[in-house]
Image (spheres, rainbow, N blue to C red):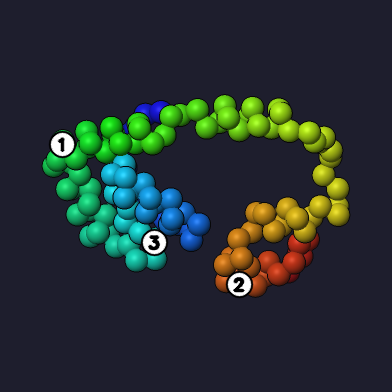
Amino acid sequence: MLALPAIVIALAENQQPIARVMESKGAVINLGSSAAITPAIVASSLESLLLSQQDRVAMSRQARQLVDGRGARRVISAIRAADFQLRLVEERDCHILWELTIPPFARCRFPRNLSPGSST
């Protein structure tokens, strides 16, 4: 865990809650949704962060307290402890994979991706 000071921008709706929590804990500067970000907002936030060593040190300390850097190990342990079997992907899995990889907003904005396996 590097615990580096960070300015975060939520690229997707599901990223906003964690960004808000991390900001409320003092671990990051949250600029909110990417839809509302301008270069001036990023520049101003970056300048403020660069000019305040005290803020950078505090953010680093907070990040280190919130994130222990062992998340991947916990995921691997949980997978190893789970009772399941892997199998090769089959054609019938196409829709499941499509749902997991193409977020709903992209399906609406890019109508060419209307169904799994579609070539149009």
- The residue at which mark 2 appears reads as 108
- Residue furthest out toward the left: 51
Question: Which image quarter: residue 77?
Answer: top right
What residue is at 65 percent from the left and 32 percent from the top?
78
Name the quarter where the N terminus is drawn. top left
Return the x and y of residue 24 as percentages of the image width and height.
Answer: 31, 50
Residue that label 1 marks? 54
Q: Closer to the camera: disc 2 or disc 3?
A: 3
Q: Residues within 10 Å of mark 2 (few under 14, many from 20)?
A: few
Rendered location of residue 37, percent (x, y): 32, 62
Q: Is residue 102 left or right of residue 20?
A: right
Question: Camera-side residue: 35 or 4?
Answer: 4
Q: Residues within 10 Å of mark 1 (few under 14, many from 20)?
A: few
Q: Is residue 78 left or right of residue 119?
A: left
Numbered badge on residue 33:
3
Give how far across and how far down residue 71 sits, in percent.
Answer: 52, 32
Residue at (35, 59) in percent of width and height: 32
Label 2 SS? helix
The CA distance from mark 2 to mark 3 is: 19 Å
Total of numbered circles in the picture?
A: 3
Which residue is drawn at the image coordinates 84% and 40% (left, top)? 88
> Looking at the image, which is closer to me, 89 or 53?
53
